[in-house]
Image: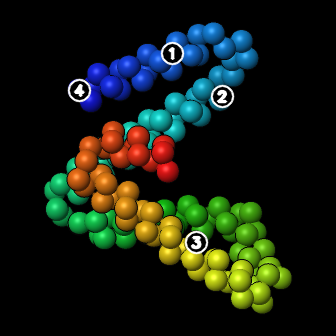
């Protein structure tokens, strides 16, 4: 059933792209890489959660550790650390509260996504992710 659903989605994407007069190869390539990465992430997450080697929190931890390296490199390249440190809004208590709330809610979102993947298929998690 999952294979049929994926095949129908791919067929629908091909049908939609056939009639596109403003064909942009780089745009289609970026979307295709994103779709492939999302599918592989869902399948890999499902396999690791089912294997019970790491569990949800272990998977979240290693995901954060692995992604910290490119995030730090990108932030250093764009000089984002200095922009954050020199931001004038840090003295405003509402800004700080909103920032902390967004961090906590981000962790909650990742946890709920992992939990959804644990109890459902990777395809169901992807569909639910589109709805959020």
* Quadrant showing the N terminus: top left
- Image quadrant assignment for residue 70: bottom right
Q: Which residue is mark 4?
A: 1
Q: Which residue is mark 1?
A: 14
How far is the residue under mark 4 from the one under mark 1? 20 Å
- The residue sitting at 31% across, 54% down in the picture is 116
Above or below residue 113? Residue 83 is below
- N-term-proximal mark, 3 vs 1: 1
- Image quadrant assignment for residue 126: top left
Badge 3: how crowded within 10 Å, few (<14), some, or many (20+)? Answer: few
Q: Which residue is mark 2?
A: 26
- The residue sitting at 51% across, 35% down in the picture is 33
- The residue sitting at 18% across, 54% down in the picture is 50
- N-term-proximal mark, 4 vs 2: 4
Above or below residue 96? Residue 50 is above
Instruction: Say whether residue 82 is left or right of residue 127.
Output: right
- N-term-proximal mark, 1 vs 2: 1
Q: Which residue is mark 3?
A: 102
- N-term-proximal mark, 4 vs 1: 4
How far is the residue under mark 4 from the one under mark 3? 37 Å
The colour scheme used to paint the residues is: rainbow
Dot 1 falls on a residue whose secondary structure is: helix
Q: Is the Cβ of the residue at disc 4 closer than 8 Å to that at disc 2? A: no
How far is the residue under mark 3 from the one under mark 2? 32 Å
């Amino acid at each position: 059933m999952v294979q049929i659903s994926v095949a129908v989605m791919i067929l629908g994407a091909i049908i939609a792209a056939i009639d596109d007069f403003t064909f942009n190869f780089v745009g289609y390539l970026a979307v295709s890489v994103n779709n492939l990465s999302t599918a592989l992430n869902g399948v890999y997450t499902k396999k690791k959660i089912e294997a019970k080697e790491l569990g949800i929190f272990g998977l979240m931890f290693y995901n954060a550790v692995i992604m910290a390296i490119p995030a730090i490199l990108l932030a250093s390249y764009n000089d984002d650390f200095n922009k954050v440190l020199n931001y004038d809004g840090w003295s405003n208590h509402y800004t700080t509260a909103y920032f902390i709330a967004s961090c906590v809610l981000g962790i909650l979102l990742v946890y709920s996504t992992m939990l959804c993947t644990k109890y459902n298929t990777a395809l169901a998690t992807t569909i639910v992710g589109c709805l959020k």
